[in-house]
Image: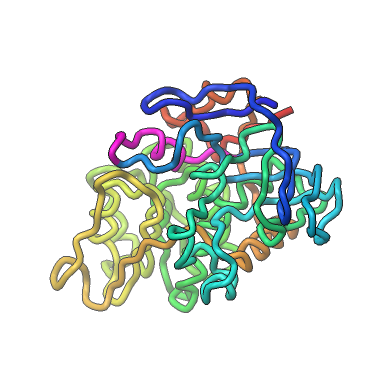
Amino acid sequence: MKALQYTALGAEPAVVDIPTPKPGPGEILLKVTAAGMCHSDIFVMDLPEEAYVYGLPLTLGHEGAGTVAELGAGVDDYAVGDAVAVYGPWGCGSCHACSLGRENYCVRAADLAITPPGLGSPGSMAEYMIVDSARHLFPIGDLDPVVAAPLTDAGLTPYHAISRVLPLLGPGSTAVVVGVGGLGHVGIQILRAITAARIIAVDLDEERLTLAREVGADEAIRSDANAAAAIRESTGGEGATVVFDFVGAQSTIDMAQQVVAIDGHISIVGIHAGAHAKVGFFLVPFGASVVTPYWGTRTELMEVIALARAGKLDIHTEAFALDDGPAAYRRLREGSILGRGVVVPK
């Protein structure tokens, strides 16, 4: 089968031919119908040798959708041909967090060498992939797999970040979304669907600011030297109730700390090497919290899929053939994909 793999440190990913895997006991073989592209993939591929821990070669793709092709011994939750999405942050299944469906916060995964697809385990950018357990699959029915695949991260991650601060996002609140990319443009829609917050979008790119308005932002502000002042002015000087930073660069984290309100909240969702928040008295407003949420829970993925099936989410995607995967990642790196890039391995 064909797979898109990161094969050597510092190299571009490449399309290679590898054996089609066979499912072992408890495992499921999926015929992949769509695999989402993420800036986290670029973060991984840019890591220096001393920080790289994901193994080589690595089949990329931690967002996946497919149809069940073969069942391993003991699996009776699904039938061949079922259309499913893959829950990515695999855990042990038995610790306290996992028993609550919060496998994204499994306390034993690292010790047991359990890794997510595309981030240690073979991922979804291939014609077939192995899923380790039926509990990591969710039915999608007739939902377009090109839409369903990004829901597993680009939908789930902002949904998790927003869900944990829902009590703050009532009438009169303001949510700032920094970065209107694959996650940010979905985050705006989730905020519109499940909260009463006024939404301010911030981005460098005018096309993305236009997209932000189209999908539900009340205001769109260019991310420049005047952005913090503009947000303060827009909120009557009070600042933002919650800031969701889907970029995670030092400049955006610094801006979030400048604009968050007293007793507000900052979620740093995006990842940039070396970027960090400076927390302490007089560095953030009194009562303000700063967190780094990770992915989302199994229950939350069910809810995100339900939102999409109800027509509440309009995932903007650009599809690429598997053979065009290397060029697609170049496009992702240069920032020329609007919304989410999705590889379709037909």
Give coordinates of residue 211: x percent, y percent: 53, 43
Majority secondary structure in the magenta region = helix
The image quadrant that residue 43 belongs to is top left
The image quadrant that residue 76 belongs to is bottom right
Residue at 34% from the left image edge and 69% from the top image edge: 265
Residue at 29% from the left image edge and 50% from the top image edge: 252
Q: Is residue 48 left or right of residue 327?
A: left
Q: Is residue 199 left or right of residue 71?
A: left
Magenta range = 36-50
Vertical relation: 135 (above or below) 55: below
Q: Can residue 302 be seen at all in this image of the molecule?
A: yes
Q: Is residue 48 left or right of residue 170?
A: left
Between residues 304 and 175, which one lies in front from this camera angle?
304
Vertical relation: 188 (above or below) 15: below
Quadrant occupied by the C terminus: top right
Vertical relation: 333 (above or below) 218: above
Q: Can residue 191 be seen at all in this image of the molecule?
A: no
* Residue 95 among those drawn in magenta: no
Between residues 216 and 139, which one lies in front from this camera angle?
139
* Residue 47 among those drawn in magenta: yes
Judged from this view, the residue extending furthest toward the left is: 282
Quadrant occupied by the N terminus: top right
Residue at 48% from the left image edge and 43% from the top image edge: 181
**Is the image coloured rainbow, by chain, by secondary structure, or in one colour?**
rainbow
Give coordinates of residue 121: x percent, y percent: 55, 44
Give coordinates of residue 307: x percent, y percent: 68, 61
Residue at 40% from the left image edge and 39% from the top image edge: 44
